[in-house]
């Protein structure tokens, strides 16, 4: 509900699925990017509202090919795991980051939006080349909180859970959340996780 002030509405007023990278490896021009629009400018932290009006346009890959990792760091369960997020390591992910920025700039230069845009504050008109875009993104960007795969499902003993979501080596224990997906679903996590939970309920009932 919009209460008439900058932080009185939802986080994003508009979301779009776009094809920023052209034809993918499967020969399909399917959406590869989600773009989010926020009617609010932020300061250099990317979190606090800026002291002026503005719009924030964010984009991220729906199917990134760069994979991070999570590993146990100690036998002590209270010791945090070793997490290596990794971003934009693959050539495809780096190329897509530059294409997304091009798409966003083209959109904001299109009427009637163009008449409302005074200037580009970040990353700024000086960030043009693919290398510049990747360098800027790595220095200032953040994840979209759609991480998956830390307990990925798979057919081998090296995979944490099997096809019935049972944890290998821990009888009676199942995992039912986004961590069991081997690859990211293309979009938000809520519906896929609910679908996994629905299926898990059937599996648990069958095994009871």
Image: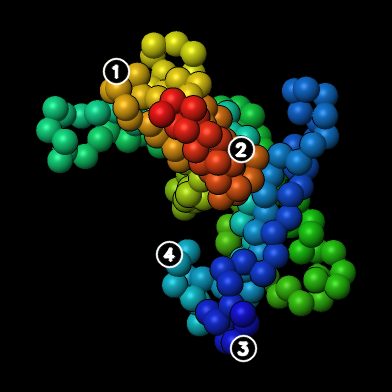
In space, the residues marked 1 and 3 are separated at their CA atoms by: 54 Å
In the rendering, at what x and y percent does residue 50 appear? 50, 77
In space, the residues marked 3 and 2 are separated at their CA atoms by: 34 Å
Give the mark nearer the N terminus: 4 vs 2. 4
The answer to whether marks 4 and 2 mark residues whose Cβ atoms lie closer than 8 Å is no
Task: Report helix, strand or loop for mark 2.
Answer: loop
User: Which numbered dot is residue 169?
Assistant: 1
Does residue 80 appear anywhere in the picture?
Answer: yes
Residue for point 67% across, 49% down: 34
Give the mark nearer the N terminus: 4 vs 1. 4
Q: Nearer the viewer, mark 3 or mark 4?
A: 3
Residue bearing mark 2 = 185
Is disc 3 surrounded by few (<14), some (14 to 19) or many (20+) residues within 10 Å?
A: few
**Going by the image, does 73 lie left or right of 177?**
left
Is disc 4 surrounded by few (<14), some (14 to 19) or many (20+) residues within 10 Å?
A: few
Residue bearing mark 4 = 45
Q: Nearer the viewer, mark 1 or mark 3?
A: 1
Farthest-out residue, top: 156
In space, the residues marked 4 and 2 are separated at their CA atoms by: 29 Å
Farthest-out residue, right: 111
Quadrant in the rendering for residue 56:
bottom right
Task: Report helix, strand or loop for mark 1.
Answer: loop
Residue for point 64% across, 45% down: 187
The answer to whether marks 1 and 3 mark residues whose Cβ atoms lie closer than 8 Å is no
């Amino acid at each position: 509900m919009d209460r008439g002030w900058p932080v009185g509405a939802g986080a994003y007023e508009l979301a779009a699925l776009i094809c920023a990278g052209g034809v993918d490896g499967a020969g399909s021009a399917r959406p590869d990017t989600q773009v989010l629009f926020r009617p609010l400018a932020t300061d250099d932290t990317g979190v606090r509202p800026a002291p002026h009006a503005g719009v924030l346009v964010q984009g991220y890959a729906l199917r990134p090919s760069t994979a991070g990792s999570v590993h146990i760091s100690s036998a002590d369960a209270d010791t945090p795991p070793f997490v290596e997020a990794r971003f934009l390591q693959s050539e495809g992910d780096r190329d897509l980051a530059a294409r997304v920025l091009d798409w966003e700039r083209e959109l904001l230069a299109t009427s009637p939006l163009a008449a409302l845009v005074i200037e580009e504050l970040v990353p700024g008109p000086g960030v043009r080349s693919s290398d510049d875009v990747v360098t800027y993104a790595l220095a200032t960007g953040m994840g979209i909180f759609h991480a998956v795969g830390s307990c990925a499902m798979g057919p081998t003993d090296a995979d944490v859970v099997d096809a019935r979501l049972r944890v290998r080596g821990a009888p009676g224990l199942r995992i039912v959340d986004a961590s069991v997906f081997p690859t990211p679903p293309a979009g938000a996590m809520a519906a896929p996780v609910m679908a996994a939970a629905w299926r898990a309920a059937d599996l648990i009932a069958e095994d009871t």
